[in-house]
Image (cartoon, rainbow, N blue to C red):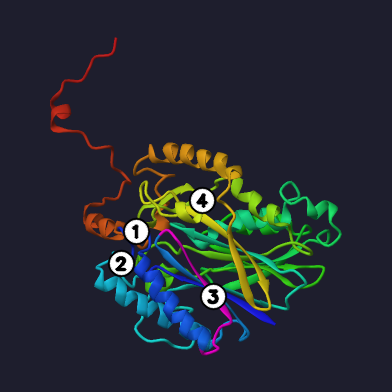
């Protein structure tokens, strides 16, 4: 049984919220290599997307291993010290507490993990997003595992024809539900169409029961009780055989769908598929973007990665995303570019509303106010 753990954190931006300094990546690599030498993990790859550091690790200790999570926590702490020395922006931003307490869940970092028996060939894709929240995976995951217009295997491959089971989390009420596609597709859509409340946590094959995909669903603002940036989620998906093909898993990202996040975590923008080299954010601290790294797993080792969006097949999606970004930016501070009020809960908006509260009046029985100048004007005669 092999476990793959992807644990991410924003521990300091270079410059601003745009990217990751190479010294942070080196500090994390040194910490993980030490853990590999001690036998905590089998293999690792350090990646980044925008200003987030992503630890991709394989091991034999199962999900939520205290040893593996502590190794990740120590790696982030070591890199945070480097970030503070370099005076990087938001150093240690996602490390919300000072002490490790068994796992990193609830401490700030995002986590996606799955354990499985290696197949004869075990291809996986690790998706990493920046300047958005976990609900950004809802639409792509539905299309990967439930939409026959996206995934031809749902129709023509016997191993996929029975469909998939979706584990959906209500992140407001801390509840979950399992729903099956295609029979309960409408129920699935009724929930995941509200991605700021309902997130797809995992997907399972109904023919074998094996896990197919798992995402991070941590919401930093809910943990911290204040705005600390968007959550920048990660996603692990297994490919081929009883799962969709690599090309079917990438296909949903040809459509740069609208996601929350972008500037100050408070704006709606298109999710742009980019190469690792292009993952550094820029325009309005964005637009939101996603990287896809492909690996083969062989005896617990990571063979790769292949930078799957570094391909001209996604040029049109990037062009479309830029056009959508132009359109959305022209709304300025107005919805739907700015997020709805309930999503602005952790910004400065509550302070503004509190400051203006004493000036709010009951509108019942009041006509619209008129200026003194208008009050002095004579009434116009109607012929």
- Look at the image and say whether residue 73 sits in the magenta stretch: no
Cα–Cα gap, marks 1 and 3: 25 Å
Which circle, 3 or 2, is nearer the viewer? 3
Instruction: Tell me the quarter of the image containing the N terminus.
Output: bottom right
Q: Which residues lie in the magenta part?
A: 38-50
Cα–Cα gap, marks 3 and 2: 25 Å
161 left or right of 9? right
Q: Does residue 80 lie above or below 265 as drawn?
A: below
Q: Which residue is mark 1?
A: 17
Badges 3 and 2: C-beta atoms under 8 Å apart?
no
Q: Which residue is mark 4?
A: 274
Question: Which badge, 4 or 2, comes first in the chain's sequence?
Answer: 2
Question: Which badge, 4 or 3, comes first in the chain's sequence?
Answer: 3
Q: Which residue is mark 3?
A: 44
Question: Which badge, 4 or 1, comes first in the chain's sequence?
Answer: 1
Cα–Cα gap, marks 1 and 2: 8 Å
361 left or right of 343? left
């Amino acid at each position: 049984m092999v476990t793959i753990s992807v644990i991410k954190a924003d521990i300091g931006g270079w410059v601003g919220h745009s990217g990751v300094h190479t010294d942070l990546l080196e500090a994390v690599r040194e910490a993980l290599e030490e853990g590999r030498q001690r036998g905590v993990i089998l293999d690792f790859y350090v990646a980044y997307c925008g200003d987030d550091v992503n630890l991709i690790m394989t091991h034999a200790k199962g999900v939520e291993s205290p040893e593996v999570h502590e190794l990740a926590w120590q790696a982030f702490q070591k890199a945070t010290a480097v970030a503070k020395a370099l005076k990087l922006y938001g150093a240690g931003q996602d490390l919300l507490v000072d002490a490790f307490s068994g796992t990193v869940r609830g401490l700030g970092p995002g986590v996606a993990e799955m354990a499985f028996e290696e197949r004869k060939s075990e291809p996986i894709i690790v998706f990493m997003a920046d300047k958005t929240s976990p609900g950004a995976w809802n639409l792509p995951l539905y299309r990967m595992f439930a939409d026959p217009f996206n995934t031809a295997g749902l129709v023509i491959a016997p191993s996929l024809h029975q469909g998939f089971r979706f584990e959906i989390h209500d992140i407001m009420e801390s509840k979950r539900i399992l729903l099956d596609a295609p029979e309960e597709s409408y129920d699935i859509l009724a929930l995941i169409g509200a991605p700021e409340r309902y997130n797809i946590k995992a997907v399972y094959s109904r023919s074998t029961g094996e896990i197919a995909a798992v995402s991070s669903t941590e919401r930093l603002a809910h943990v911290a009780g204040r705005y600390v940036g968007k959550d920048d989620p990660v996603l692990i998906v297994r490919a081929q055989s009883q799962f969709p093909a690599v090309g079917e898993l990438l296909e949903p990202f040809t459509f740069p769908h609208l996601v929350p996040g972008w500037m100050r975590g408070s704006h709606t923008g298109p999710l742009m598929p980019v190469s690792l080299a292009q993952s550094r954010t820029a325009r309005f601290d964005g637009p939101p973007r996603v990287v896809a790294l492909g690996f083969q797993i062989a005896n617990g080792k990571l063979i790769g990665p292949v930078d799957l969006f570094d391909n001209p097949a996604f040029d049109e999606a990037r062009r479309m995303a830029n056009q959508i970004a132009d359109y959305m930016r022209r709304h300025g501070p107005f919805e739907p570019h700015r997020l709805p009020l309930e999503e602005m809960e952790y910004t400065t908006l509550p302070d503004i509303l509190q400051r203006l509260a004493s000036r709010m009046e009951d509108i019942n029985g009041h006509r619209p106010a008129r200026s003194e100048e208008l009050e002095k004007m004579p009434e116009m005669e109607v012929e």
